[in-house]
Image: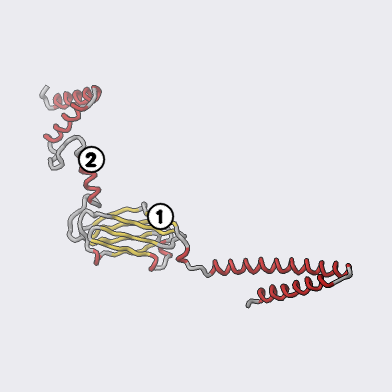
């Protein structure tokens, strides 16, 4: 029993004793005196009980398991990537990340993905995922380093190929963009493919676009001496 609990218990006994005396007292002056003391004790007990509850609440917050606190989950969008013949490197900017304990930063690697988690950074949990990498990497040799406000991730390439894109999704998106005018994606961009593209634009375009293309073609032919 704490000191405050002991005080509350003693006051409770005093209150009970005074209430008993009030029940048997006959003189009004004595009753008034006892009633006054009773109100004082009741008020004192109430204050002690409130203080005791506040103390318990404060102690519970202090001893609460950090795992019970729900951190906000945030996706990392502020990053850049680069490559060398051996590595694909990611540079992620996170203020104060270098102040975290090492166990708060984890990164998992697969042959075609990486997944990074950063926990307890100013009441936030950050995550960064890259799926369907363009070419395979070597998970067991890949690693990361923490620098001032930055995490650098090193993916070890399985071959020294230069990556024109980061992921297969990026490659497919670029292929669709290049072929939106009906040009076959395997066709080289030589003069014939360019002519096919312009011809397709001319046939599908409005009158203004057709006039512009016709004028450009005429000027081009004139500069070559054909007109």
Query: Which quadrant of the structure image shows residue 44?
Result: bottom right
- Above or below for 194 versus 169: above
The image's mark for residue 66 is none
Q: What residue lies at 14% left-to-right and 32% top-to-bottom? A: 196
Disc 2 crowd, CA 10 A, few/some/many (<14, 14-19, 20+): few
The N terminus lies in quadrant: bottom right
Residue 180 in picture, x, y percent from top left: 21, 37
Q: Secondary structure at mark 1?
A: strand
Q: What residue lies at 20% left-to-right and 26% top-to-bottom? A: 213
Residue 18 in picture, x, y percent from top left: 79, 72
The C terminus lies in quadrant: top left
Query: Which quadrant of the structure image shows residue 149?
Result: bottom left
Query: Which quadrant of the structure image shows residue 204?
Result: top left
Q: Nearer the viewer, residue 154 or 177?
A: 177
- Above or below for 227 versus 163: above
> Would residue 36 appear left or right of 47 to someone viewing this image?
right
Q: What residue lies at 12% left-to-right and 27% top-to-bottom? A: 224
Q: Give whichever of discs 1 and 2 has the lower sequence position.
A: 1
Residue 220 in picture, x, y percent from top left: 16, 27
Q: What residue lies at 87% left-to-right and 70% top-to-bottom? A: 26
Q: Residues under labels 1 and 2: Cα distance?
A: 31 Å
> Would residue 20 appear left or right of 164 to someone viewing this image?
right
Q: Which residue is mark 1?
A: 74
Q: Secondary structure at mark 2?
A: helix
Q: Nearer the viewer, residue 2 or 143?
A: 2
Q: Which residue is mark 2?
A: 177
| Tag count | 2
- Which numbered mark, 1 or 2, is in the foreground of this view? 1
Disc 1 crowd, CA 10 A, few/some/many (<14, 14-19, 20+): few
Residue 7 in picture, x, y percent from top left: 70, 75
Q: Nearer the viewer, residue 105 or 190?
A: 105
């Amino acid at each position: 029993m704490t000191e405050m609990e002991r005080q509350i218990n003693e006051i409770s006994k005093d209150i009970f004793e005074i209430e008993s005396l009030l029940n048997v007292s006959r003189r009004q002056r004595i009753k008034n005196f006892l009633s006054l003391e009773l109100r004082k004790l009741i008020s004192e007990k109430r204050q002690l009980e409130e203080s005791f509850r506040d103390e318990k609440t404060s102690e519970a917050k202090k001893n609460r398991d950090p795992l019970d606190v729900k951190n906000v989950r945030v996706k990392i969008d502020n990053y850049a990537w680069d490559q060398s013949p051996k590595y694909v490197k990611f540079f992620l900017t996170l203020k104060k990340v270098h102040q975290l304990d090492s166990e708060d930063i984890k990164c998992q690697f697969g042959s075609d993905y990486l997944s990074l988690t950063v926990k307890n950074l100013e009441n936030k949990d950050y995550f960064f995922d890259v799926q369907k990498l363009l070419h395979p990497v070597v998970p067991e040799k890949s690693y990361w380093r923490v620098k001032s406000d930055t995490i650098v991730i090193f993916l070890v390439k399985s071959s020294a190929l230069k990556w024109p894109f980061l992921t297969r999704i990026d490659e497919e998106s670029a292929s669709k963009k290049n072929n939106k005018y009906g040009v076959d994606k395997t066709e080289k961009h030589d003069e014939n493919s360019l002519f096919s593209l312009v011809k397709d634009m001319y046939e599908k375009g409005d009158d203004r676009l057709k006039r512009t293309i016709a004028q450009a073609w005429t000027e081009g032919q004139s500069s070559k001496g054909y007109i």
